[in-house]
Image: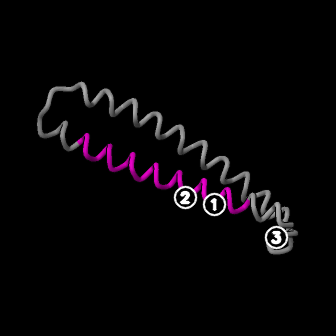
Amino acid sequence: MKTTQLPERQVLNKLKKRLQKVIRTYEKVIVKMEVQLEKVNRMEEDEAVTTLRQTMMTGLDQSRKFLEKAQEDYKKITNQQADL
């Protein structure tokens, strides 16, 4: 059965489950990146470490933004389900 044929509630449930997985994944990624960033922060300062730190912080910021967006989408889906 194609997605277009599924009732709206089922589609919302599938989206909700997918977003839950995405949220869990981003939470895990953020925790791992924070641990790695702590290790980098303990390293001696040089150009390579500074570049690595900046790259990791950029990735961490992006992951946090994606997590926030996924959480917002999850809330929207939950609200849509409540309206049905």
Residue 52 lies left or right of residue 5; in this view the side is left
Q: Amino acid at mark 1?
A: Asp
The image quadrant that residue 77 belongs to is bottom right
Q: CA distance from mark 1 to mark 3?
A: 22 Å
Q: Which residues, given as a range, are shown in magenta?
A: 52-77
Q: Is residue 9 above or below residue 27?
A: below
Dominant secondary-structure state across the stretch colored magenta? helix
The image quadrant that residue 24 belongs to is top right
**Residue 41 percent coordinates (x, y):** 25, 30
Most foreground residue, 14 or 34: 34
Most foreground residue, 38 or 81: 81
Depth check, mark 2 against mark 3: the one in front is 2
The residue shown at (45%, 49%) is: 63
Q: Which mark is residue 57?
A: none
Q: Is residue 23 above or below residue 44?
A: below
**Residue 2 percent coordinates (x, y):** 81, 70
Secondary structure, mark 3, is: loop
Secondary structure, mark 1, is: helix
User: Mark 2 touching mark 1, by CB under 8 A?
Assistant: yes
Most foreground residue, 6 or 61: 61
Q: Amino acid at mark 3?
A: Lys
Q: How many marks?
A: 3
Q: Look at mark 1 in the image and give the residue it sits on.
A: 73
Within 10 Å of disc 2 (Cα), the crowding (few <14, some 14-19, many 20+) is: few
**Residue 74 percent coordinates (x, y):** 67, 56
Q: Look at mark 3 in the image and give the residue it sits on.
A: 2
Q: Look at mark 2 in the image and give the residue it sits on.
A: 69
Secondary structure, mark 2, is: helix
39 part of magenta stretch = no
Q: Earlier in the sequence, mark 2 or mark 3?
A: 3
The residue shown at (55%, 58%) is: 69
